[in-house]
Amino acid sequence: MTKKINIAILISGTGSNMQALVDACLSPNFPACVAVVIANKPTSLGLAWAKENGIATVLIDQQKFALQENPKLAFEQELQNVLQNFAVELICLAGFMRLLSGCFVAKWPQKIINIHPSLLPNFKGANAVFDALQAKATITGCTTHFVVEEMDAGPIILQQKVPIDQADNLESLKAKILQQEHQIYPKTLKIVCNQILAKIK
């Protein structure tokens, strides 16, 4: 049995990339185990899927911190507590639509990974697929990277190109990119976990 790194998957929505990671982790030879799925919105459909598949889930509703003096700090303190309670060693962002503070990221150096629907550094931000179409790009894709304080700016791990056809619209291009995301995110997780395990030995 391969030694496995405990991971947390953070989601905001349906969590289709989460499902790809969970499927990969089911293999006895895959070096990661999903310790917990954490969502920041009660409407996240991915939470129900994770529960149905026997994975521990935690909802940290960001709205409950809205009236606090520093909502971001309060949210991240609770997030840190949950991660510690589940002995998490690596964080995977999978459609987690919230920027993490520099203070939080500093606690997890090269231990937070993300996937983004463009060939970074092109088309950063939440509207990457739309922006690629608007720019009349002929190629886009997806990128996995380590998370740093600046949005979509961390060291790149893997990239996969996706051609943009003349007939593509926002939905069709999103679907094509998502298909590739489901391929490279598990590969990325394997690479990063093996790097962590190599340092432990």
Image: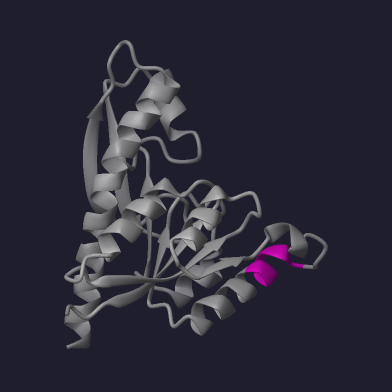
Name the residue located 30 percent from the left edge and 76 percent from the top edge: 5
Residue 141 x %, y %: 29, 35
Query: Relative to residue 111, is residue 52 drawn left or right?
Result: right
Give me the residue at 47% from left, 55% from top.
Answer: 150
* Quadrant occupied by the N terminus: bottom left
Please give left or right for residue 175 compared with residue 82 in the image. left
Image location (x, y in percent) of residue 183: 24, 46
Is residue 71 magenta-colored?
yes
Towards the viewer: 97 or 135: 97
The quarter holding residue 2 reads bottom left
Quarter location, residue 110: bottom left
Residue pictured at 63% horizontal, 74% vertical: 78
The answer to which image quadrant residue 65 occupies is bottom right
For the C terminus, give its image quadrant: bottom left
Q: Main secondary structure of the magenta part?
A: helix
Instruction: Identify whether 89 is placed above or below 14.
Output: below
- In this rendering, the answer to whether 36 lies above or below 15 is below
**Residue nearest the viewer, comparing 153 with 158:** 158
Q: Which residues are magenta?
A: 70-75
Residue furthest to the right: 67
Q: Nearer the viewer, residue 17 or 126?
A: 17
Where residue 187 appears, as percent x and y from the top left, is 21, 56
Residue 52, given in percent of the width and then of the height, sits at 49, 59
Coloring basis for residues: one colour
Residue drawn 41% across the image and 17% down it: 169
Q: Is residue 119 visible?
A: no
87 on left or right of 60: left
Residue 182 visible in the shown view = yes
Q: Is residue 175 magenta?
A: no
Tell me: residue 47, above or below residue 14. below
Q: How many marks?
A: 0
State whether residue 57 is above or below residue 119: below
